[in-house]
Amino acid sequence: MTTKTGRIVGVNGNMVTAEFDLAVHQNEVAYVVVEDLRLIAEVIRIRGRYADLQVFEDTSGLRVGGRIEFADEMLSVELGPGLLTQIYDGLQNPLPAIAEQCGFFLPKGLQVVALPRETEWDFTPKAGPGDVVQAGDVLGTVPEGIFQHWVMVPFAFQGSYRVVSVAAAGSYHVADEIAVLENEDGQFSVSMMQKWPVKRPIRAYAERMRPSEQLVTKMRILDTFFPVAKGGTYCIPGPFGAGKTVLQQLISRHADADVVIIAACGERAGEVVETLREFPVLMDPRTGHSLMERTVIICNTSSMPVAAREASVYTAVTIAEYYRQMGLNVMLLADSTSRWAQALREMSGRLEEIPGEEAFPAYLESVIAAFYERAGIVRLNDGSVGSVTIGGTVSPAGGDFEEPVTQSTLKVVGAFHGLSRARSDARRYPAIDPLDSWSKYPSIVPADELARARKTLRDGREVQEMMKVVEEAGTSMEDFIVYLKAEYLDAVYLQQDAYDAVDGSSSAERQKHVFDVMSKIVTAELDFPEKDSARRFFQTLSQVTKDWNRSEMDSPEFVSLEGRIHDMLAEVARNA
Amino acid sequence: MRKVYHEITQIAGNIITVAATDVGYHELAEVSSPNGTSLAQVIRLEGEHVTLQVFAGTRGIPTNAEVRFLGRRLMTPYADALLGRVFTGSGIPRDGGPRLDENLIEIGGPPVNPARRIIPQKMIRTGIPMIDIFNSLVESQKLPIFSVAGEPYNELLARIALNAEVDIIVLGGMGLKYDDYLYFRDTLEEEGALSRSIMYVHTASDPVVECLLVPDTCLAVAEKFALEGKRVLVLLSDMTNFADALKEVAITMEQIPSNRGYPGDLYSQLAARYEKAVDFEGAGSLTVLAVTTMPGDDVTHPIPDNTGYITEGQFYLRNGRIEPFGSLSRLKQQVNADTREDHRTIMNTMIQLYAAFKEALEKQSMGFRMSAWDLKLIKYGGLFEDKMMDLSVNIPLERALDVGWDILAECFAPEETGIPTRLIEAFWPAKAAVVAVAETGGEDGTVEQAA
C-alpha cells in the first residue's frame, strides 16, 4: 500500500496546516516528518485541499514544504495483558521504557510500543472450535498480576463468528495468534492484543444499568454525605490549594475498585511522581499486593505537549472500558479536566473558531458530556457486571464555579464535591463544602439520620451567621448548642486526618458505627448552665472523639473511648 | 551560507512578517538596520510569509531591513565563567565583562520524563518560622511569592537566597526596576554570595519582548548546573511582567484572548517554565522561587490564578508578613514528618487557632462583647503575630517549635488546643500549664460577673 502524503503549508504553535492529494478523514492520524523524526499528529479540520493537524509534540524546526504521512487510522491504543502497573504518556508511550532509552528528558518524535512484545503470558483457552462468539466474548485467559485477564474477541468484530481454532494452553507473546475466527467474509486471526480508537466508546456489553451500588472511598464526608456509586460520575471543582489532587490521591488509594486508572492531565509532574514512587510499596489491604498492581497511570503533565492532554483522557477512559469488559470495577481519576478544556481552547483559538464564553469553544459542553457518559455499570454478554466510575477534578479560573468548565461538568455528573477556599484556609480537610455539595447516589447510612445531620450542619451555619450580627450573648442557648453540635460534627466526622494511619481510611462498617453515635449526639437534648461550659464540653468531647477516630476499630482503646463518649453525653443529657 | 531577506511585508507591535522560504519554526534570525541589530524568533509560518518577534522591538526598523536566518534555535552560553556575572535576557554582558560565546546550549529544551523524577525530600531551611514550620520549602519545589507592588518581596527573595543552603543562585529579573537590580547585585555582593550567583536582568526600560527570554535562559543554565550535581536556586522577579509580555505578543498576533486579554495558553506557557524545577536522581536539583505581583491584590487575576494551579504552593506576602492563610507549601508533608514529632501538630493547631483568633478579632471590631474564649484567642493572636509572623524573626526550626509551645501554654489549657494527649504529655511546658489553668478560672469569673 502506498502511503498517503501531504506537505506542510503553515505552522502556528502546535497546529500545522497541510496540503493533501488523496482522501483523508477527520481525526485521522498523520505523521509530520522533520529531519529523521516522525511527529504524531491528528487531523482536526479539513477545508478543501487543506487539512489542519494538531501536532502532539513540539513543532520547532518544522518547515513549509515538509513531508506529512497520513496513517489511514484514527488515534488508537493497544489493549491487552501488560497494561496494569504501566506508566504511559497521553499517547500510550511507556515512560519508564523511554527513560531507559533516553535518560532524564523526553525527546520528541519517539514512539515506543505500549505493550511489551517479548513478555510471555500463560494462556488458558476458554472457547473451543465450533463455538459461536461475538465481540467481547472470552476466548481464553492469562493471569495478569492479581487478575485473570480475559482475552476477548476484538471489539471491532461486528456480528457473530465461529471459532475455527484456539491455541492450546501455554506461553505466548501478546502479538502471537491465539485464535482463528470465521464468518461469511472469511477467516480472521486474533491475538491477545487489539487496537481501539480512543474517541469511540467500547460497547461490547449486553446492557447498561443504573448505578446503585456504593463505591466506598473510606472518606467519611464522601461515603456518608456525598457518596459515589460504582459506574457513577463525580467532579471535584475547587480553587488551587483546596486539596483537589490530595483528595484524588486518597481516593485512588482507598477506593474499593478493582482497577484504578489515573489520568494526570496537564497538572504538576511532582504529584504524579508521588503516586509513581509510593504505589509500588503501598500494600492494598484487600488483595495483599502492592497498589501498583491494580493501577495504570496516564501521565501528561503540564510541561508535556499540550495537544496530548486531550488524548490522555481518552486513552485513560479507553483502558478503563477495556477492564470493565472483564467484569471488573474500574475507577478513573482525571486530574484535571480543566487543563484538557484549555487544550481544546488553545486549539480552537488557532483554528480561529468563533469563541464561546471565556474563549472556550462552543462544543465544550458536548465534549465534556460525551466523556463523562463513558462511565457506567454494565452487564456483559456472559451476565457478569463491570463498571467504570469517573471522577474528574475541575480547576476553575479564580475559583469561581460559574465558569464554563465547571458548569458544563455539573450538568452531567452524579455527584458534586465542591471544595471551598474558606474550609481549606481553616485547615478543615477534606475541604469539601458540606452545604453546597450534593450527590444523587444512595448513602451507606440511613437516609433519615443523614437528613438530620445535614439539617444540624445547615442550622449550625445559620446560627453562626446570626451570631456575627447579634453576638454570642444575643443567641439563645438552644441555638448555641445547635451551633456547637454542627461544629462538633464537622470537626470529628467531616474532617479526617489523611496522614493518620487509622483515621486516614475509615471502612464502611466503621462509618456506620460512628455515624450512629454521631446521630445520638446530634439528636440528644443537652443541658448546660451557661455557654462557656457548653463550649468546654464540646471541646473536650471533640478531643475524645478525635482520639477515638485515631484508635483501631474494636481495639480496647476504641471500646473504652466510645464508653467515655457515652458517659460524657449521659452527664449533660436532659432528663439524665 | 544563509540567505538574507529584505522584503518585510508587515510591521505591527514587535512583530514583523517577511517573505522567505525554507525557514524552520522557532528558528532564530538577525534583523539588521541602520538603527541596530536585533535577534528575532519565528513564531508563525504561513506559506511564504514568515512572522517573527523582534526581541529588541521594531522601533526604527525599515521595510528593507536585512533579515538573516541563523539556522538554529535560541542558544545561550554555559560555563563556570558565568558565575558572578550579569547578563541581559539574550546573554549579552551587562557588567562590562567579556562576552561568552562558547559552549552554547539550547534554551527551552525538552521536559523531564516524569518517570525519572523522584519524590523531593530535602528541606531547605530559611530561618523564617512562617516558612520553616508552617510551609517548609523543599529542594526542587516551585513556589511563587504572591504580593502587591510596594511589599518587600525582593528583600524577602534576597533573604531566602542568602539563608538557603544551595550551591548556585540564578537570578532572573523581568521588568525589574533599575534600583531593584542594583539592590540584588549589592546585597549578593555584600554577603559574599555574588561569586556563586548568575544574574540575567531585563529592566523596566529594556524592550518588552526581551523579557520573554529571561526565564528560559535562567532555567536552561540552571538545569545544566543541576545536571552536574549542583543544588541551584532560581529566583525570578517578577513573573507578572513576563505574562504581560506574552499578552502583548499574543494580542499583536491577533490571537483570541481568553481572560482579561491574556492568551489561552498562559497556563501552558507558565507551566513550561515552572515545571523545570526538578530533583535529578544522582545529580543536583533546581528550585524555583518567583515573585508574582497581583494586579489590584486580586488573586483571581489570570496571572496569580494560573500560577497557583501550576506551582507547589504559594507564599502570600502582605503587610510585610507571610500570611498564614492561603500560603501553602504542597511539599511540606514530604519533609515535616522527619523534623520533630510535634512539627505537624504545632503547624495545624496554631493555624486553626489563628483562624479562630481572626473571627474573634472580627467580633471585637464590631463592638461585640468578648467571651472568655475570645479573650484568650485575642491574646494568642497577638503573641503569634509578634513571635512567629514577624519577618525579622530569624531562628532555626527547632527553636521556633519551642516558641510555639510556649505561646500555646501561655494562652490556653491543654484540652482547649485539640492536640493529641500523647503530644501534650511530651511537650506541654509544665509550669506554664498551671498558670494557664489559673488564668482561665480568673477570666471566667470576671465574665460571669459582667454578664
Image: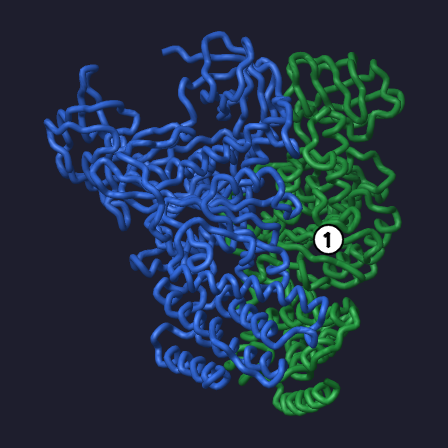
> Which residue is at 66% across, 92% downward?
B438
Depicted A103 relative to depicted A18: above or below: below
- Residue A189 or residue A373, whichever sits in front: A373
Q: Is residue A409 visible?
A: yes
Amino acid residing under circle 1: Phe
Residue A510 placement (x, y as % from top left) = 37, 67
User: Which residue in the protein does label 1 denote?
Assistant: B146
Asked where in the image residue A120 lies, by quadrant, the reply is top left
Name the residue: 27% across, 41% down.
A326
| Rendered colour, chain A | blue
Residue A160, by quadrant, is top left
Which residue is rendered at x = 51% and y = 81% of the image? B421
**Which residue is nearer to you in this view: B177 or B76?**
B177
Front-most of residues A530 and A560:
A530
- Left or right of residue A28, residue B180 in this image: right
Residue B116 percent across, percent down from the top left = 49, 47
Q: Give the class, few, some or many, for how many residues have Cα within 10 Å of label 1's Cα (few <14, many ≥20).
A: many
Q: How far across and how far down the image is residue A364, in percent?
A: 55, 32
Question: Which tint was used for chain B?
Answer: green
Q: Residue at x 69, y 84 (%)?
A: B410
**In this picture, is B372 found above or below B63?**
below
Colour scheme: by chain
Element on which disc 1 rests:
strand
Task: Give left or right: position of A21 versus A190.
Answer: right
Query: On the rendered structure, is A360 left or right of A4?
Result: right
The residue furthest top is A21
Chain hosting mark 1: B
Quadrant that contains the N terminus of chain A: top left
Q: Is residue B198 visible?
A: no
Q: Which percent across, then down, holds residue A235?
A: 50, 46
